[in-house]
Amino acid sequence: MKRLIVESYLLLLWIDLVMAFRNLQVLHRQVQRKTVGRSWRGPLCRVDELCHAMDLACVFYTKQILCLQRSAATTLLLRRHGIYAEMVIGAQMLPFKSHAWVEVDGAVVNDKPYVREIYQVLERC
C-alpha cells in the first residue's frame, strides 16, 4: 500500500507541475493518450485500493488538490494498473459549477455515485 501511495503522490506532483508550467490542454492530452497498461509488478490492484491510495496521497500532499487534478491522477493511476478508467468533466448551469470525477465501467469510483445527476457531462477522456 505504501508503494501505491507514493506512486499516487508522484502523479499528483507531476500534474501540479503540468498545470503550473503548461496548461489544461496539455493535461487533457496526456490523460487522453494514456493507454491501459499491464502491471509488471505482479497481480493487478483493485479499483478501491487504488482510489484509497490516491485519497491518502491527497491528504499528505502539501497543497490543496482540486477535483480536476485528483481525477486526472486517479485516471492515470488506474490505467497504469490495467484498469480502463475515464476522467469525466461536467458542469452545472445554475449556479455555475464545474467538477471532474472518474468512472470505471460507467460507475463513479472517486466521488459520490449521484454526481452524474448533478452535473451535465461535457467531456470524457
Image: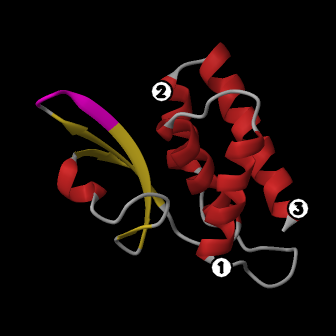
Q: Residues within 10 Å of mark 1 (few under 14, many from 20)?
A: few
> Residue 45: percent from the left, percent from the top?
72, 78
Q: Amino acid at mark 3?
A: Arg
Q: CA distance from mark 2 to mark 3?
A: 29 Å
Give whichever of discs 2 and 1 has the lower sequence position: 2
* Magenta-colored segment: predominant secondary structure: loop
Secondary structure beneath dot 2 equals helix
Secondary structure beneath dot 1 equals loop
The N terminus sits in image quarter: bottom right
Q: Look at the image and tell me whether residue 125 can be seen.
A: no
| Residue at image mark 3 | 3
Give whichever of discs 3 and 1 has the lower sequence position: 3
Q: Is residue 3 magenta?
A: no
| Residue at image mark 2 | 25
Q: Amino acid at mark 1?
A: Arg
Q: CA distance from mark 2 to mark 1?
A: 30 Å
| Residue at image mark 1 | 46
Position of residue 43 relative to residue 71, above or below, is: below
Q: CA distance from mark 3 to mark 1?
A: 14 Å
Instruction: Provide the residue span drawn in magenta.
Output: 94-98
Position of residue 23 relative to residue 14, above or below, is: above
Q: Residues within 10 Å of mark 3 (few under 14, many from 20)?
A: few
Q: Residue at x 62, y 29 (%)?
A: 64
> Residue 59: percent from the left, percent from the top?
70, 44
> Residue 101: percent from the left, percent from the top?
42, 51
Residue 14 appears left or right of 20: right
Q: Nearer the viewer, residue 36 or 43?
A: 43
Q: Look at the image and tell me whether residue 28 can be seen.
A: yes
Give whichever of discs 2 and 3 has the lower sequence position: 3
